Image: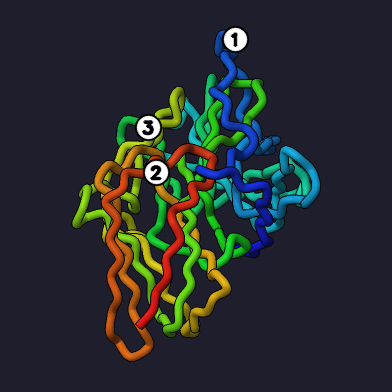
Amino acid sequence: MKKNPILWGAVLLCGMALSGCQQPEPSGQPQELPVPTVLTVSITQPTRTEIVAGENPHPIYWENGDWIVVHFDTDPEATEMHYYALTSGAGTTEGTFEWQNWDDTLPATYNSLVAGYSAMYVSFTENAELVLEAHSEIFMGLENVSDFPMHGSANAGDPLAFHCGFGLVHVAVTGNVTISRLAIDTAPQSGQEIAGQFKIALDTYETTFLQPGPASTNQYEIVWSGKQNVTLSDTPVDFYGVMPDGTYNAGTTFTFTLSDGSTIVKTTQQPFTVSRAQILNLPPLDIVQ
């Protein structure tokens, strides 16, 4: 997928609250309507798309190449999914998505729907529970954050808005060494899952770990592994990782792999809390030899 830069400013001391963290608005009684082949979807949570500087709250835009997955309550199989691609609205907060007929059949009518983004990381359980995957990648630079997990649900005929059950952690790194890899690992301290497939509670946005996924085989670790090594200096290099919301009471471990294959390990036992739709600034790290 095409990636546009994210430019998030006005950082608060403990993180930056982004727009649209409100709870879902209650809707009326479900009604049975024909299944739409075209959906209009708004964004109320941060994603990987461009944010215009100087506006507060920052608008968040759809971009060309975006796909969503939709499940209708009348689908014959609880795990059935339908793919919708963005056809208009790139560069705005409201996009039009059109059904792509990939040998699937839409039901004739529906009462409600559930949808997820990005399409390649969405699935449903046998009980029709939405599953999103937070893949185990750390991004160097906020402009490179991609495929930020989002979801939405709506009764037939109601507006469809996407929300987020995940947050971002940020660590600024300085030093005098050259690194080829950075891993954030919760297993030694808390053993809390930070990557993999998570069930999403549609009413509260709560995330519950389900299992590792194709893009996240180690549920306790997220990793940056650059195509090129990075030489650290007094100018901070910013790393960002998508993590489920929650309190990590025992801290975490940062493992830096140097260009010669040796490692430097930094461990913090200080608790920290990741909140939905916010960036949490972890203490900066200075990696020196």
- Quarter of the image for the N terminus: give it: bottom right
- Quarter of the image for the C terminus: give it: bottom left
Residue occupied by mark 1: 28
Q: CA distance from mark 3 to mark 1?
A: 22 Å
Q: First in sequence: mark 2 or mark 1?
A: 1
Using the image, tell me which numbered label, if any, was put on residue 219.
none
Q: Determine the secondary structure under disc 1.
A: loop
Judge the density around disc 2: few (<14), some (14-19), many (≥20) Cα neighbours within 10 Å.
many
Q: Determine the secondary structure under disc 3.
A: loop
Residue farthest toward the top in the current orientation of the protein = 29
Is residue 227 or residue 173 the one in the foreground? 173
In the depicted structure, whether residue 42 falls above or below residue 252: above
Position of 249 with respect to 119 (left or right) is left
Q: First in sequence: mark 2 or mark 3?
A: 3
Could you tell me residue 30's position as x and y percent?
55, 13
Residue located at (34% from left, 48% from top): 197
Residue located at (54% from left, 33% from top): 152
Q: How is the image coloured?
A: rainbow
Q: Amino acid at mark 3?
A: Ala
Residue occupied by mark 2: 244
Q: Is residue 270 visible?
A: yes
Judge the density around disc 3: few (<14), some (14-19), many (≥20) Cα neighbours within 10 Å.
some
Q: Amino acid at mark 1?
A: Gly
Q: Is residue 105 visible?
A: no
Is residue 241 or residue 91 the one in the foreground? 241
In the depicted structure, whether residue 215 falls above or below residue 108: below
Could you tell me residue 110's position as x and y percent?
54, 23
